[in-house]
Protein backbone atom coordinates (compact mmCIF):
# COMPACT_ATOMS: atom_id res chain seq x y z
CA UNK A 1 0.00 0.00 0.00
CA UNK A 2 2.91 2.36 0.68
CA UNK A 3 4.03 1.99 -2.90
CA UNK A 4 0.52 2.59 -4.20
CA UNK A 5 0.42 5.73 -2.07
CA UNK A 6 3.66 6.86 -3.72
CA UNK A 7 2.10 6.23 -7.11
CA UNK A 8 -1.01 8.15 -6.07
CA UNK A 9 1.12 11.05 -4.81
CA UNK A 10 3.08 11.36 -8.05
CA UNK A 11 -0.08 10.88 -10.10
CA UNK A 12 -1.76 13.63 -8.08
CA UNK A 13 1.06 16.08 -8.86
CA UNK A 14 1.21 15.13 -12.52
CA UNK A 15 -2.56 14.96 -12.67
CA UNK A 16 -3.12 18.34 -11.03
CA UNK A 17 -0.55 19.98 -13.28
CA UNK A 18 -2.03 18.22 -16.29
CA UNK A 19 -5.52 19.37 -15.31
CA UNK A 20 -4.31 22.94 -14.84
CA UNK A 21 -2.36 22.82 -18.09
CA UNK A 22 -5.27 21.38 -20.03
CA UNK A 23 -7.66 23.86 -18.45
CA UNK A 24 -5.43 26.72 -19.54
CA UNK A 25 -4.89 25.11 -22.92
CA UNK A 26 -8.64 24.80 -23.39
CA UNK A 27 -8.73 28.57 -23.73
CA UNK A 28 -6.99 28.19 -27.06
CA UNK A 29 -10.12 26.50 -28.34
CA UNK A 30 -12.63 29.32 -27.66
CA UNK A 31 -10.06 31.93 -28.71
CA UNK A 32 -9.26 30.22 -31.99
CA UNK A 33 -12.77 29.00 -32.78
CA UNK A 34 -14.18 32.46 -32.13
CA UNK A 35 -11.52 34.06 -34.32
CA UNK A 36 -11.65 31.42 -37.05
CA UNK A 37 -15.24 30.65 -38.10
CA UNK A 38 -16.01 27.01 -38.87
CA UNK A 39 -16.92 27.78 -42.48
CA UNK A 40 -13.52 29.37 -43.11
CA UNK A 41 -11.67 26.12 -42.56
CA UNK A 42 -8.70 27.68 -40.71
CA UNK A 43 -9.28 25.53 -37.64
CA UNK A 44 -9.41 22.55 -39.97
CA UNK A 45 -5.88 23.47 -41.10
CA UNK A 46 -4.75 23.61 -37.47
CA UNK A 47 -6.36 20.22 -36.79
CA UNK A 48 -4.80 18.65 -39.87
CA UNK A 49 -1.27 19.98 -39.33
CA UNK A 50 -1.24 19.02 -35.66
CA UNK A 51 -2.27 15.49 -36.63
CA UNK A 52 0.95 15.20 -38.65
CA UNK A 53 2.87 16.72 -35.74
CA UNK A 54 1.53 14.08 -33.33
CA UNK A 55 2.87 11.36 -35.59
CA UNK A 56 6.23 13.04 -36.04
CA UNK A 57 6.84 13.45 -32.30
CA UNK A 58 6.55 9.66 -32.00
CA UNK A 59 8.91 9.17 -34.94
CA UNK A 60 11.52 11.57 -33.60
CA UNK A 61 11.49 10.25 -30.02
CA UNK A 62 11.30 6.63 -31.34
CA UNK A 63 10.33 5.09 -28.02
CA UNK A 64 13.37 6.48 -26.24
CA UNK A 65 11.38 7.71 -23.22
CA UNK A 66 10.31 4.17 -22.27
CA UNK A 67 13.71 2.80 -23.29
CA UNK A 68 15.39 5.44 -21.12
CA UNK A 69 13.41 4.31 -18.03
CA UNK A 70 14.14 0.67 -18.77
CA UNK A 71 17.90 1.13 -19.09
CA UNK A 72 18.24 3.58 -16.20
CA UNK A 73 16.85 0.91 -13.85
CA UNK A 74 18.60 -2.03 -15.53
CA UNK A 75 21.41 -3.79 -13.68
CA UNK A 76 24.82 -3.37 -15.27
CA UNK A 77 24.01 -0.08 -16.99
CA UNK A 78 25.65 3.24 -16.13
CA UNK A 79 22.79 5.76 -15.62
CA UNK A 80 24.96 8.74 -16.60
CA UNK A 81 26.03 7.04 -19.82
CA UNK A 82 22.45 6.03 -20.58
CA UNK A 83 21.19 9.57 -20.14
CA UNK A 84 23.97 11.19 -22.16
CA UNK A 85 23.67 8.64 -24.95
CA UNK A 86 19.90 9.15 -25.11
CA UNK A 87 20.34 12.92 -25.35
CA UNK A 88 22.93 12.58 -28.13
CA UNK A 89 20.80 10.14 -30.12
CA UNK A 90 17.63 12.24 -30.07
CA UNK A 91 19.53 15.48 -30.69
CA UNK A 92 21.20 14.02 -33.78
CA UNK A 93 17.99 12.68 -35.31
CA UNK A 94 16.12 15.93 -34.58
CA UNK A 95 18.79 18.05 -36.30
CA UNK A 96 18.90 15.76 -39.35
CA UNK A 97 15.11 15.84 -39.59
CA UNK A 98 14.97 19.65 -39.44
CA UNK A 99 17.61 19.90 -42.18
CA UNK A 100 15.76 17.45 -44.45
CA UNK A 101 12.50 19.33 -43.99
CA UNK A 102 14.19 22.60 -44.94
CA UNK A 103 15.64 21.09 -48.12
CA UNK A 104 12.53 19.21 -49.29
CA UNK A 105 9.81 21.54 -47.98
CA UNK A 106 8.09 22.19 -51.33
CA UNK A 107 7.33 18.58 -52.35
CA UNK A 108 6.34 17.70 -48.76
CA UNK A 109 3.96 20.66 -48.49
CA UNK A 110 2.47 19.85 -51.88
CA UNK A 111 1.80 16.22 -50.88
CA UNK A 112 0.01 17.45 -47.75
CA UNK A 113 -2.19 19.83 -49.75
CA UNK A 114 -0.41 23.04 -48.72
CA UNK A 115 1.58 23.85 -51.87
CA UNK A 116 0.37 27.46 -51.60
CA UNK A 117 1.50 27.72 -47.97
CA UNK A 118 4.63 25.61 -47.38
CA UNK A 119 5.41 27.77 -44.35
CA UNK A 120 2.63 25.97 -42.46
CA UNK A 121 4.56 22.75 -42.76
CA UNK A 122 8.07 24.11 -42.19
CA UNK A 123 7.26 25.98 -38.98
CA UNK A 124 5.46 23.11 -37.26
CA UNK A 125 7.82 20.37 -38.43
CA UNK A 126 10.87 22.25 -37.13
CA UNK A 127 8.96 22.88 -33.90
CA UNK A 128 8.30 19.17 -33.45
CA UNK A 129 12.03 18.48 -33.82
CA UNK A 130 12.65 20.86 -30.91
CA UNK A 131 9.92 19.21 -28.83
CA UNK A 132 11.31 15.74 -29.53
CA UNK A 133 14.69 16.67 -28.13
CA UNK A 134 13.08 18.35 -25.10
CA UNK A 135 11.18 15.12 -24.34
CA UNK A 136 14.37 13.48 -23.02
CA UNK A 137 15.22 16.01 -20.28
CA UNK A 138 11.52 15.96 -19.37
CA UNK A 139 11.78 12.17 -19.01
CA UNK A 140 14.83 12.68 -16.81
CA UNK A 141 12.79 14.93 -14.51
CA UNK A 142 10.29 12.10 -14.14
CA UNK A 143 13.07 9.61 -13.42
CA UNK A 144 14.58 11.70 -10.63
CA UNK A 145 11.11 12.36 -9.20
CA UNK A 146 10.92 16.09 -9.85
CA UNK A 147 7.26 16.37 -10.80
CA UNK A 148 7.04 19.98 -9.63
CA UNK A 149 9.66 21.25 -12.08
CA UNK A 150 8.24 19.00 -14.79
CA UNK A 151 4.75 20.37 -14.24
CA UNK A 152 5.88 24.00 -13.90
CA UNK A 153 7.67 23.99 -17.24
CA UNK A 154 4.78 22.30 -19.00
CA UNK A 155 2.31 24.84 -17.60
CA UNK A 156 4.62 27.76 -18.38
CA UNK A 157 4.80 26.63 -22.00
CA UNK A 158 1.04 26.64 -22.27
CA UNK A 159 0.68 30.01 -20.53
CA UNK A 160 3.08 31.56 -23.05
CA UNK A 161 1.04 30.01 -25.84
CA UNK A 162 -2.26 31.27 -24.44
CA UNK A 163 -1.03 34.80 -23.80
CA UNK A 164 0.44 35.16 -27.28
CA UNK A 165 -2.67 33.73 -28.94
CA UNK A 166 -4.84 36.08 -26.92
CA UNK A 167 -2.62 39.00 -27.83
CA UNK A 168 -2.45 38.37 -31.56
CA UNK A 169 -5.93 36.97 -32.15
CA UNK A 170 -7.98 39.20 -29.83
CA UNK A 171 -6.19 42.14 -28.16
CA UNK A 172 -4.23 43.74 -31.02
CA UNK A 173 -7.12 43.49 -33.53
CA UNK A 174 -9.51 44.97 -30.92
CA UNK A 175 -7.13 47.90 -30.36
CA UNK A 176 -6.59 48.27 -34.13
CA UNK A 177 -2.85 47.89 -33.63
CA UNK A 178 -0.59 46.34 -36.25
CA UNK A 179 2.93 46.98 -34.90
CA UNK A 180 4.74 44.44 -37.06
CA UNK A 181 2.52 44.60 -40.14
CA UNK A 182 1.44 40.98 -39.75
CA UNK A 183 -2.30 41.53 -40.18
CA UNK A 184 -4.10 41.52 -43.50
CA UNK A 185 -6.94 43.90 -44.38
CA UNK A 186 -9.59 43.94 -41.64
CA UNK A 187 -7.05 42.69 -39.10
CA UNK A 188 -7.30 39.11 -40.32
CA UNK A 189 -4.40 37.02 -39.04
CA UNK A 190 -2.93 34.23 -41.14
CA UNK A 191 -3.17 30.87 -39.39
CA UNK A 192 0.60 30.42 -39.76
CA UNK A 193 1.10 32.85 -36.86
CA UNK A 194 -0.54 30.30 -34.56
CA UNK A 195 2.27 27.95 -35.59
CA UNK A 196 4.97 30.58 -35.08
CA UNK A 197 3.69 31.16 -31.55
CA UNK A 198 3.99 27.43 -30.87
CA UNK A 199 7.58 27.43 -32.12
CA UNK A 200 8.51 30.35 -29.87
CA UNK A 201 7.07 28.60 -26.80
CA UNK A 202 8.95 25.39 -27.59
CA UNK A 203 12.27 27.23 -27.90
CA UNK A 204 11.73 29.01 -24.57
CA UNK A 205 10.85 25.73 -22.82
CA UNK A 206 13.98 24.02 -24.16
CA UNK A 207 16.15 26.87 -22.90
CA UNK A 208 14.63 26.49 -19.44
CA UNK A 209 15.83 22.86 -19.41
CA UNK A 210 19.48 23.95 -19.67
CA UNK A 211 20.41 22.36 -16.34
CA UNK A 212 19.11 18.91 -17.39
CA UNK A 213 20.86 19.26 -20.75
CA UNK A 214 24.22 19.31 -18.96
CA UNK A 215 23.87 15.53 -18.74
CA UNK A 216 25.14 15.34 -22.31
CA UNK A 217 28.69 15.96 -20.97
CA UNK A 218 28.93 12.34 -19.76
CA UNK A 219 29.47 11.32 -23.36
CA UNK A 220 28.01 9.12 -26.06
CA UNK A 221 28.52 5.37 -25.83
CA UNK A 222 28.11 3.22 -28.96
CA UNK A 223 27.57 -0.04 -27.07
CA UNK A 224 24.78 1.52 -25.00
CA UNK A 225 23.31 3.03 -28.15
CA UNK A 226 23.13 -0.36 -29.89
CA UNK A 227 21.49 -2.03 -26.90
CA UNK A 228 18.93 0.75 -26.60
CA UNK A 229 18.10 0.68 -30.31
CA UNK A 230 17.57 -3.07 -30.17
CA UNK A 231 15.08 -2.59 -27.35
CA UNK A 232 13.37 0.50 -28.72
CA UNK A 233 12.65 -0.22 -32.37
CA UNK A 234 9.52 -2.30 -31.64
CA UNK A 235 8.38 0.54 -29.36
CA UNK A 236 8.84 2.94 -32.27
CA UNK A 237 6.65 0.81 -34.51
CA UNK A 238 4.12 0.40 -31.71
CA UNK A 239 4.17 4.12 -30.99
CA UNK A 240 3.72 5.12 -34.61
CA UNK A 241 0.92 2.68 -35.16
CA UNK A 242 -0.64 3.57 -31.82
CA UNK A 243 -0.55 7.30 -32.58
CA UNK A 244 -1.92 6.53 -36.02
CA UNK A 245 -5.07 5.45 -34.20
CA UNK A 246 -5.40 9.02 -32.90
CA UNK A 247 -4.09 11.00 -35.86
CA UNK A 248 -5.03 8.98 -38.94
CA UNK A 249 -8.59 10.26 -39.14
CA UNK A 250 -7.46 13.89 -39.14
CA UNK A 251 -4.84 13.09 -41.78
CA UNK A 252 -7.05 10.98 -44.03
CA UNK A 253 -10.19 13.11 -43.79
CA UNK A 254 -9.27 15.73 -46.44
CA UNK A 255 -8.38 12.98 -48.91
CA UNK A 256 -11.61 10.96 -48.56
CA UNK A 257 -14.25 13.58 -47.74
CA UNK A 258 -16.83 13.79 -50.52
CA UNK A 259 -16.63 17.53 -51.18
CA UNK A 260 -14.32 20.44 -51.93
CA UNK A 261 -11.07 21.13 -50.09
CA UNK A 262 -12.67 24.10 -48.34
CA UNK A 263 -15.64 22.01 -47.18
CA UNK A 264 -13.31 19.26 -45.97
CA UNK A 265 -11.29 21.71 -43.89
CA UNK A 266 -14.49 23.21 -42.44
CA UNK A 267 -15.86 19.80 -41.41
CA UNK A 268 -12.50 18.70 -40.04
CA UNK A 269 -12.32 21.92 -38.05
CA UNK A 270 -15.70 21.17 -36.45
CA UNK A 271 -14.55 17.68 -35.50
CA UNK A 272 -11.17 18.88 -34.28
CA UNK A 273 -12.70 21.59 -32.08
CA UNK A 274 -15.34 19.35 -30.49
CA UNK A 275 -13.00 16.49 -29.61
CA UNK A 276 -11.03 18.99 -27.53
CA UNK A 277 -13.81 18.66 -24.94
CA UNK A 278 -13.22 14.91 -24.90
CA UNK A 279 -9.52 15.45 -24.26
CA UNK A 280 -10.07 15.42 -20.50
CA UNK A 281 -9.74 11.66 -20.85
CA UNK A 282 -6.38 12.07 -22.58
CA UNK A 283 -5.36 14.33 -19.72
CA UNK A 284 -6.20 11.70 -17.10
CA UNK A 285 -4.49 8.92 -19.05
CA UNK A 286 -1.39 11.04 -19.60
CA UNK A 287 -1.16 12.01 -15.93
CA UNK A 288 -1.46 8.36 -14.93
CA UNK A 289 1.16 7.35 -17.49
CA UNK A 290 3.74 9.89 -16.32
CA UNK A 291 3.70 8.40 -12.82
CA UNK A 292 2.87 4.79 -13.70
CA UNK A 293 5.63 4.09 -16.24
CA UNK A 294 8.68 4.61 -13.97
CA UNK A 295 6.68 3.08 -11.08
CA UNK A 296 6.06 -0.17 -12.97
CA UNK A 297 9.69 -0.71 -13.92
CA UNK A 298 10.80 -0.12 -10.33
CA UNK A 299 7.97 -2.32 -9.00
CA UNK A 300 8.92 -5.18 -11.35
CA UNK A 301 11.42 -6.44 -8.77
CA UNK A 302 8.71 -7.04 -6.15
CA UNK A 303 6.81 -10.30 -5.66
CA UNK A 304 3.35 -8.79 -5.28
CA UNK A 305 3.62 -6.61 -8.36
CA UNK A 306 0.79 -8.31 -10.25
CA UNK A 307 -1.70 -7.55 -7.51
CA UNK A 308 -0.56 -3.93 -7.59
CA UNK A 309 -1.06 -3.75 -11.37
CA UNK A 310 -4.56 -5.24 -11.03
CA UNK A 311 -5.62 -2.72 -8.41
CA UNK A 312 -4.15 0.17 -10.39
CA UNK A 313 -6.19 -0.92 -13.41
CA UNK A 314 -9.38 -1.01 -11.35
CA UNK A 315 -8.95 2.48 -9.95
CA UNK A 316 -7.96 3.84 -13.34
CA UNK A 317 -11.21 2.56 -14.83
CA UNK A 318 -13.30 3.95 -11.95
CA UNK A 319 -11.88 7.45 -12.23
CA UNK A 320 -12.05 7.61 -16.02
CA UNK A 321 -15.68 6.51 -15.94
CA UNK A 322 -16.35 9.22 -13.39
CA UNK A 323 -14.70 11.77 -15.69
CA UNK A 324 -16.82 10.52 -18.60
CA UNK A 325 -20.04 11.01 -16.63
CA UNK A 326 -18.94 14.45 -15.41
CA UNK A 327 -18.32 15.71 -18.94
CA UNK A 328 -21.62 14.33 -20.18
CA UNK A 329 -23.49 15.76 -17.18
CA UNK A 330 -22.23 19.29 -17.77
CA UNK A 331 -22.10 19.32 -21.56
CA UNK A 332 -24.52 22.27 -21.66
CA UNK A 333 -21.78 24.32 -19.98
CA UNK A 334 -18.71 22.77 -21.58
CA UNK A 335 -19.99 23.42 -25.09
CA UNK A 336 -19.08 27.08 -24.62
CA UNK A 337 -15.44 26.03 -24.85
CA UNK A 338 -15.94 26.07 -28.62
CA UNK A 339 -17.54 28.69 -30.85
CA UNK A 340 -21.23 28.28 -31.62
CA UNK A 341 -20.51 27.60 -35.27
CA UNK A 342 -18.88 24.32 -34.13
CA UNK A 343 -21.64 23.00 -31.84
CA UNK A 344 -23.09 20.61 -34.40
CA UNK A 345 -20.09 18.36 -33.81
CA UNK A 346 -20.62 17.84 -30.06
CA UNK A 347 -22.26 14.48 -30.71
CA UNK A 348 -18.79 12.96 -31.19
CA UNK A 349 -17.71 13.72 -27.61
CA UNK A 350 -19.08 10.59 -25.82
CA UNK A 351 -17.76 8.33 -28.56
CA UNK A 352 -14.26 9.82 -28.44
CA UNK A 353 -14.18 9.75 -24.63
CA UNK A 354 -15.17 6.08 -24.56
CA UNK A 355 -12.42 5.37 -27.09
CA UNK A 356 -9.86 7.15 -24.91
CA UNK A 357 -10.88 5.08 -21.87
CA UNK A 358 -10.15 1.93 -23.86
CA UNK A 359 -6.83 3.39 -25.00
CA UNK A 360 -5.91 3.96 -21.35
CA UNK A 361 -6.76 0.37 -20.50
CA UNK A 362 -4.69 -0.77 -23.49
CA UNK A 363 -1.77 1.30 -22.17
CA UNK A 364 -2.09 -0.27 -18.70
CA UNK A 365 -2.15 -3.73 -20.25
CA UNK A 366 0.95 -2.96 -22.31
CA UNK A 367 3.38 -3.50 -19.44
CA UNK A 368 3.26 -7.27 -19.72
CA UNK A 369 5.23 -7.20 -22.96
CA UNK A 370 7.50 -4.35 -21.83
CA UNK A 371 8.49 -6.19 -18.67
CA UNK A 372 8.98 -9.50 -20.46
CA UNK A 373 10.96 -7.88 -23.32
CA UNK A 374 8.31 -8.90 -25.88
CA UNK A 375 7.79 -5.35 -27.13
CA UNK A 376 7.09 -6.57 -30.67
CA UNK A 377 3.63 -7.60 -29.45
CA UNK A 378 2.79 -3.97 -28.86
CA UNK A 379 3.45 -3.28 -32.53
CA UNK A 380 1.17 -6.18 -33.50
CA UNK A 381 -1.72 -4.98 -31.33
CA UNK A 382 -1.42 -1.35 -32.39
CA UNK A 383 -1.06 -2.40 -36.02
CA UNK A 384 -4.28 -4.39 -35.94
CA UNK A 385 -6.06 -1.44 -34.33
CA UNK A 386 -4.68 0.98 -36.90
CA UNK A 387 -5.82 -1.29 -39.71
CA UNK A 388 -9.34 -1.30 -38.29
CA UNK A 389 -9.28 2.49 -38.01
CA UNK A 390 -8.05 3.10 -41.55
CA UNK A 391 -10.62 0.71 -43.04
CA UNK A 392 -13.50 2.39 -41.18
CA UNK A 393 -12.24 5.85 -42.18
CA UNK A 394 -11.74 5.04 -45.84
CA UNK A 395 -15.07 3.25 -46.20
CA UNK A 396 -17.30 5.55 -44.16
CA UNK A 397 -15.86 9.11 -44.29
CA UNK A 398 -17.39 9.75 -47.74
CA UNK A 399 -20.83 8.87 -46.37
CA UNK A 400 -20.82 9.89 -42.69
CA UNK A 401 -18.17 12.66 -42.61
CA UNK A 402 -16.46 13.14 -39.23
CA UNK A 403 -18.79 10.74 -37.39
CA UNK A 404 -16.89 7.97 -39.15
CA UNK A 405 -13.68 9.31 -37.58
CA UNK A 406 -15.13 9.09 -34.08
CA UNK A 407 -16.37 5.51 -34.49
CA UNK A 408 -13.15 4.46 -36.23
CA UNK A 409 -11.15 5.34 -33.11
CA UNK A 410 -13.68 3.59 -30.89
CA UNK A 411 -13.47 0.27 -32.74
CA UNK A 412 -9.69 0.50 -33.19
CA UNK A 413 -9.02 0.86 -29.46
CA UNK A 414 -11.61 -1.76 -28.57
CA UNK A 415 -9.93 -4.35 -30.80
CA UNK A 416 -6.41 -3.51 -29.56
CA UNK A 417 -7.53 -3.64 -25.93
CA UNK A 418 -9.26 -7.01 -26.17
CA UNK A 419 -6.44 -8.71 -28.09
CA UNK A 420 -3.76 -7.34 -25.73
CA UNK A 421 -5.64 -8.66 -22.71
CA UNK A 422 -6.18 -12.08 -24.27
CA UNK A 423 -2.53 -12.59 -25.29
CA UNK A 424 -1.20 -11.01 -22.09
CA UNK A 425 -2.99 -13.55 -19.92
CA UNK A 426 -0.92 -16.25 -21.60
CA UNK A 427 2.54 -14.68 -21.15
CA UNK A 428 2.05 -12.53 -18.04
CA UNK A 429 -1.23 -13.49 -16.33
CA UNK A 430 -2.70 -10.84 -14.03
CA UNK A 431 -5.97 -11.39 -12.19
CA UNK A 432 -7.67 -8.14 -13.04
CA UNK A 433 -10.93 -7.49 -11.12
CA UNK A 434 -13.11 -8.00 -14.19
CA UNK A 435 -16.35 -8.28 -12.22
CA UNK A 436 -15.78 -4.93 -10.55
CA UNK A 437 -14.81 -3.31 -13.85
CA UNK A 438 -17.93 -4.75 -15.52
CA UNK A 439 -20.11 -3.52 -12.66
CA UNK A 440 -18.87 0.06 -12.95
CA UNK A 441 -19.12 -0.02 -16.73
CA UNK A 442 -22.77 -1.12 -16.64
CA UNK A 443 -23.55 1.46 -13.95
CA UNK A 444 -21.95 4.16 -16.10
CA UNK A 445 -23.99 3.16 -19.15
CA UNK A 446 -27.23 3.32 -17.16
CA UNK A 447 -26.40 6.73 -15.71
CA UNK A 448 -25.26 7.99 -19.12
CA UNK A 449 -28.63 6.99 -20.57
CA UNK A 450 -30.29 9.05 -17.85
CA UNK A 451 -28.02 12.03 -18.53
CA UNK A 452 -28.69 11.85 -22.27
CA UNK A 453 -32.44 11.81 -21.62
CA UNK A 454 -32.36 14.82 -19.29
CA UNK A 455 -30.19 16.78 -21.73
CA UNK A 456 -32.70 16.11 -24.48
CA UNK A 457 -36.02 16.66 -22.72
CA UNK A 458 -35.40 19.06 -19.81
CA UNK A 459 -34.48 22.76 -19.67
CA UNK A 460 -30.80 23.44 -19.07
CA UNK A 461 -31.13 24.30 -15.37
CA UNK A 462 -33.26 21.22 -14.67
CA UNK A 463 -30.97 18.94 -16.67
CA UNK A 464 -27.91 20.17 -14.80
CA UNK A 465 -29.65 19.54 -11.47
CA UNK A 466 -30.74 16.01 -12.34
CA UNK A 467 -27.36 15.21 -13.87
CA UNK A 468 -25.61 16.33 -10.71
CA UNK A 469 -27.76 13.91 -8.71
CA UNK A 470 -26.86 11.09 -11.11
CA UNK A 471 -23.18 11.95 -10.76
CA UNK A 472 -23.46 11.89 -6.97
CA UNK A 473 -25.08 8.44 -7.20
CA UNK A 474 -22.04 7.11 -9.03
CA UNK A 475 -19.65 8.62 -6.48
CA UNK A 476 -21.73 7.25 -3.60
CA UNK A 477 -21.53 3.75 -5.04
CA UNK A 478 -17.75 4.08 -5.47
CA UNK A 479 -17.31 5.27 -1.88
CA UNK A 480 -19.49 2.48 -0.51
CA UNK A 481 -17.79 -0.30 -2.49
CA UNK A 482 -14.15 0.76 -2.83
CA UNK A 483 -13.37 3.94 -0.90
CA UNK A 484 -15.04 3.62 2.52
CA UNK A 485 -14.92 6.96 4.31
CA UNK A 486 -13.99 5.21 7.55
CA UNK A 487 -10.54 4.50 6.10
CA UNK A 488 -9.79 8.12 5.29
CA UNK A 489 -7.45 10.12 7.57
CA UNK A 490 -8.95 12.75 9.89
CA UNK A 491 -12.57 12.42 8.70
CA UNK A 492 -12.58 8.63 8.99
CA UNK A 493 -13.25 8.64 12.71
CA UNK A 494 -16.66 10.24 12.09
CA UNK A 495 -17.81 7.35 9.87
CA UNK A 496 -16.79 4.40 12.04
Image: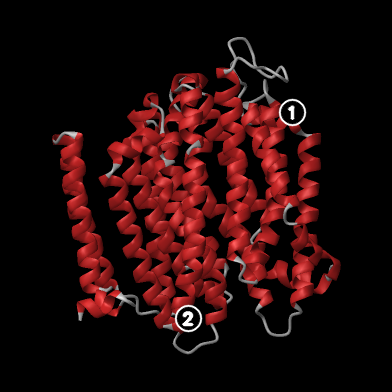
- At label 1, counting other C-alpha atoms closer than 10 Å, the crowd grade (few under 14, some 14-19, many 20 or more) is some
Tell me if residue 350 comes above or below residue 370 in the rendering: above
Q: Nearer the viewer, residue 82 or 401?
A: 82
Q: Quadrant of residue 446?
A: bottom left
Name the residue rendered at 28%, 74% in the picture: 491
Q: CA distance from mark 2 to mark 1?
A: 53 Å
Position of 424 compared to 148: left or right?
left
Name the residue rendered at 28%, 52% in the picture: 325
Looking at the image, how many numbered discs can be counted on the residues?
Answer: 2
Residue 116: percent from left, percent from top: 67, 20
Name the residue rendered at 71%, 17% in the picture: 181
Tell me if residue 57 comes above or below residue 230 in the rendering: above
The residue at which mark 2 appears reads as: 3
Residue 42: percent from left, percent from top: 53, 24
Residue 106's disc is: 1
Residue 2: percent from left, percent from top: 45, 83
Q: Nearer the viewer, residue 116 or 418?
A: 116
Position of 267 compared to 139: left or right?
left
Amino acid sequence: MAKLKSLVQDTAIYGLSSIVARFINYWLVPIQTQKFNAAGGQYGIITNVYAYVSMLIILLTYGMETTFFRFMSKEGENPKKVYATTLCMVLATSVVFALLISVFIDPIASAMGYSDHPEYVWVMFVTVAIDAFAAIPFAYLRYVHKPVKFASLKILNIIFNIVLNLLYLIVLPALKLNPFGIYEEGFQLEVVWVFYINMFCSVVTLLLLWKELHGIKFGFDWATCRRMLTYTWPLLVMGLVGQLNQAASNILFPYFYDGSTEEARAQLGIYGACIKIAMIMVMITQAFRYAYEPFVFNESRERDNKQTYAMAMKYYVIFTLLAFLAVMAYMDLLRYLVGKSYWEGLRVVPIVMAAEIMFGIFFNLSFWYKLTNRTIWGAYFSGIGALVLVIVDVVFIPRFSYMACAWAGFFAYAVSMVISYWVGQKYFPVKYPLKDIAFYTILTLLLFAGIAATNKFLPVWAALTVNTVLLVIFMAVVVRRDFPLSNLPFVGKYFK
